Image (spheres, grey):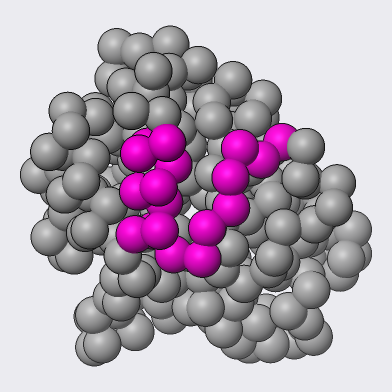
Amino acid sequence: MIKGAIFDMDGLMIDTEKLYLRFWIKSAQDFGYDMKPEHVFAIRSLSRKYSIPKLKGFFGQDFPTEDVRAHRTDLINEYVERNGLDVKKGLFELLDYLRENGIKMAVATCTPTERSRMYVEKIGASEYFSAIVGGDMITNGKPDPDIYLTAAKALGLPPEECAAFEDSPNGIQAAHSAGCYAVMIPDLTPPEDDMKPMLSAVYGSLDEAIDFFERRA
């Protein structure tokens, strides 16, 4: 029986992946580098441990990863301050269903905890979650399983009793490796063939994922 639900944030709960795509590219351009969408897709949901070597592999060892990242964050923050955040389709329908059925909920995101809390509060979803685990709370980020293991522990549940909702391949790998049911809600990229053995289900939107719990009630 599934007793917990753990949510990625960017691109899953909040429509921010398009902002990361836009502003990674803009930030890199401001530093004189020709970043393409495929470069951004390659580091989606990756911790710094993995994203920094990838970026330096793309652009050379002199690529100023932390300066570009910091500038990207500033650009995103400016955009969010002016325009707010867009919630992904079906989020609150699923959250309401889970709360009504006694399913414990947590957020597990590579985004730093303070900013994650701010975003979750900004969209009015704080009351649903017992825990928010940010990337700065763990040593090994996605695609390693640590963040899902930590989130499950925060809910007081074994990962095998938790469904993990993700939109990215790296997140799916982390959820599957942790032992969670890995449920994908694709955002910028569809599930690839090599991912499919890890997936417990794929849905077009979060509200459709109510079906996942109904089938296991």
Specify start and end residues of the magenta stretch as a single range.
198-215
- At x 35%, y 48%, the residue is 210
Percent position of residue 40, x then y: 70, 69
What is the x, y in percent for residue 132? 29, 37
The quadrant where residue 175 appears: top right
* Residue 110 within the segment the image draws in magenta: no
Which residue occupies the foreground of this view, 1 or 32?
1
For image coordinates 34% across by 84% down, the residue present is 79
**Picture coordinates of residue 50, whole percent (x, y):** 73, 43
User: Which of the two residues, 156 or 192, is positioned nearer the viewer here?
Assistant: 192
Where residue 146 sits, quadrant-wise, is top right
Task: Give the number of marks.
Answer: 0
Quarter of the rendering occupied by the N terminus: top left
Residue at coordinates 35% horizontally, 13% vertically from top-left?
157
Using the rendered image of the protein, determine whether residue 112 is visible from the camera's viewpoint: no
Please state which of residues 35 and 87 is positioned toward the viewer in this rendering: 87
Name the image quarter holding residue 10. bottom left
Does the magenta-highlighted stretch encompass residue 201? yes
Please indicate whether residue 19 sits to the left or right of residue 54 in the image. Answer: left
